[in-house]
Image (tube, grey):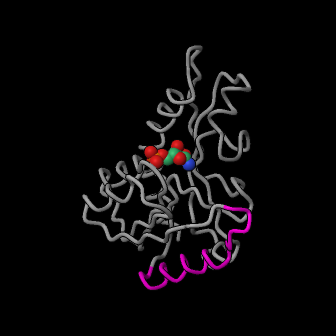
Amino acid sequence: MKNLAVFVSGTGTLLEAMIKDYLPIKLVLADRECRGMRVAMDAGIPIELAERTDFSSGFDRKTYTQWVDKILSIRKIDFVAMAGFMTILHPVIFDKYQGKILNTHPALLPSFKGDHAVRDALAYGVKVTGCTIHIATEELDAGKILSQEAVPVMSDDTVETLHERIKRVERWLYPRTIREFEKTI
Ligand code: GRF
């Protein structure tokens, strides 16, 4: 299998699911200290913390992205799966890894793009939402869709309960989609 890196910022439950599915992950990269790093450590996967220290509007996205790119080159990474990675990378990386950076989004794209997809879907009152695995491009949540699954919204759902049900689907759909995708590159 080609060399896969997983990017995380949060709890890393999707990463855990990929590990349980025996996806051979060569590297986990985090932009902040997070539980996902602990998950990687426990599984014996190499970790790189490309720590983002600036969350202001003046954030030097390009320099940060070039740092990430350098790490990927050194580790000989062929493709990337973002799994709850919260930093929007500069276009330079999408130019270089053309079509080889995947993302999962907790809504049925093109609906509810952005950071608050679950909250926005709930607030809109949709009866069905879901998740979308897609190619990441410089335009946020806009690349080619690889797979999607629907998740019904319950009348008593909160953002947390709905997101957890969506993540239950992502945990099987993402590893499967990554395997299928790998055969095409
Ligand atoms: C997922 O719902 C993903 O779609 C979103 O962040 C969540 C990651 O969950 N971008 P976790 O950190 O792996 O638990």
Rendered location of residue 128, percent (x, y): 64, 26
**Residue 162, magenta (yes or no):** no
Rendered location of residue 179, percent (x, y): 43, 58
Q: Nearer the viewer, residue 149 or 154?
A: 154
Rendered location of residue 168, percent (x, y): 44, 36
Rendered location of residue 87, percent (x, y): 60, 61
Which residue corresponds to the image point at 42% horizontal and 44% vertical from the top-left?
171
Which residue corresponds to the image point at 73% horizontal and 39% vertical from the top-left?
111
Q: Is residue 43 left or right of residue 116?
A: left
**Residue 70, magenta (yes or no):** yes
The image quarter in which residue 25 lies: bottom left
Which residue corresponds to the image point at 29% horizontal and 50% vertical from the top-left?
20
Assign the N terminus to one quadrant of the image.
Answer: bottom left
Answer yes or no: is residue 173 visible: no
The image quarter in which residue 172 lies: top left
The image quarter in which residue 153 lies: top right
| Region in magenta | 56-76
Answer yes or no: is residue 178 visible: yes
Magenta residues: mostly which secondary structure? helix
Which residue corresponds to the image point at 61% horizontal and 75% vertical from the top-left?
65
Seen in the picture, residue 168 relative to 68 is either above or below; the reply is: above
